[in-house]
Amino acid sequence: MTERRTPPKASSDEKILQEQFLRALSSFEGIILSQIDIKNRLGDRLNYAIQAGIIILGVIAFSILVLLLTLSSQVNQMSAVVLRMNGHFSSISDRMHQITNRIASMEQQVSRLETIKEQAAIMDEQMAVITGDVETMKGAVDGISRSMGGIRANVGNISATMDLMNQEVQLMSADMARTSQPARSMNKMFPFP
């Protein structure tokens, strides 16, 4: 036959049971309060972390703004340098046209000299005419000498212009290196594929 289960008997001392119950209840309450306190602390720390993250993002945004303004000013400087170089190139082009004209003039004068030499060989008997031609030749040679002086001056101007261009190119190279430094720093901070 089957045995009946009997419920556990309560302790005879109700006071002890009540004290145990109150102690268990106070322990449970302490555990719950400590968990609530820990959760509050964790919430405060999370709020502080979020605030610090917002501040850091603000600093990063400000530094990016400063970087963009710096890059903009560098681009303006580079544009000014390129405009100056364009002016130098146009000046060089003008000087080259002048040199071309002078060389054409020299060729004409040299062809005249050849004609004068041929006439001097043919017309030996006409010394008076040749003397006049020699004076003309002296004037032409003086003109050539003056043209050569002008060419030398133009070559000196071209050399000075090239020196200025070299300085501008070196300045532009230094500006490019200084301009690319923040970009390289940004590439190190934010490596994009």
Image (cartoon, rainbow, N blue to C red):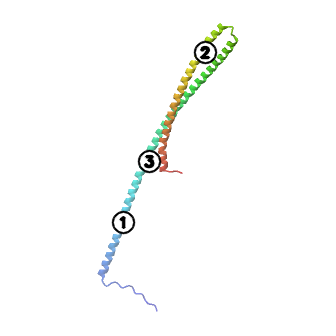
Residue occupied by mark 1: 36
- Residue 27 appears anywhere in the view: yes
- Residue 87 appears anywhere in the view: no
Relative to 121, does residue 75 appear above or below in the rendering? below
Mark 1 or mark 2, which has the lower sequence index?
1
Between circles 1 and 2, the one closer to the viewer is 2
- Badge 3 density bin: few <14, some 14–19, many ≥20, Cα 10 Å: few
- Image coords of residue 99 (percent x, y): 59, 24
Between circles 2 and 3, the one closer to the viewer is 2
Three-letter code, disc 3 = Ala
Q: Disc 1, disc 2: CB below 8 Å? A: no
Residue positioned 59% across, 18% down in the render: 144
| Front-lying residue, 68 or 159 | 159
Count of residue discs: 3
Residue occupied by mark 2: 140
- Image coords of residue 60 (percent x, y): 43, 49
- Image coords of residue 25 (percent x, y): 33, 74
Name the mark on residue 14: none
Relative to 63, does residue 127 appear above or below in the rendering? above
Three-letter code, disc 2 = Ala
Name the mark on residue 61: 3
Three-letter code, disc 1 = Ile
Residue positioned 51% across, 35% down in the render: 169
Q: Residue furthest bottom?
A: 1
- Image coords of residue 192 (percent x, y): 52, 50
Real-space Cα separation, disc 1 to disc 2, in angstroms? 111 Å
Residue 53 found in image quarter: bottom left
Residue positioned 30% across, 80% down in the render: 16
